[in-house]
Image (cartoon, rainbow, N blue to C red):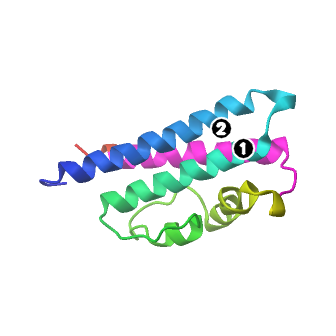
Amino acid sequence: MNGQPEVAALVRRWMEKATNDLRNAEHTLLLADDCPYDTVCFHAQQCVEKCLKAVLVREQTAFPKTHDLEELSLLLPESFARPASVEEMARLTPYGTSFRYPDDWRPVTRDEAEWSVGVARRVREAIDSWLRDRLN
């Protein structure tokens, strides 16, 4: 990123926030029976969203203010090896939007929460690795 330390710093901040969301999801999942699974899924979705936005910032690609992971993933560079499928993105997206409010709420299962954290981990690790090679 020749001569653009401010872009690199912003990318790092996006990844720091993504990592915090993942840590929050993982920690909350430890609550077992008292676990608010919808909150776990929300933070997993937020982790993935912020990771995708970090890549877009690094690539200096404009993106809309959206929580739609499919839409964001379609903006990624063609050469970028996507760490999650379009189907996984579509499945995660509602946790960042409709599951946040009581009108569209439905109970979320532990299996859903564990799945969402697994996807978030995979995405964060892959993007962190990809960025590490490009931010130095």
- Which residue lies at the image location 47% right of the left edge and 52% below the top edge? 51
Residue 39, label in figure: 1
Give the residue type at disc 2: Ala
Residue 123's disc number: none
- Mark 1 to mark 2: distance in Å? 7 Å
Relative image position of residue 112 (x, y in whole percent): 79, 48
Q: Are marks 1 and 2 in contact (CB under 8 Å)?
A: yes
- Horizontally, is 101 left or right of 46 in the view? right
Residue at the image point whose x is 41% and y is 62% from the top? 80
Considering the image in quadrants, where does the C terminus appear? top left
- The stretch in magenta equals 105-131
Residue 36: x and y, percent? Answer: 79, 39
Of badges 1 and 2, nearer the viewer stands 1
Reading the image, the residue beneath label 2 is 25
Residue type at the position of mark 1: Thr
Left or right: residue 13 compared with residue 125: left
Q: Is residue 13 above or below residue 73?
A: above
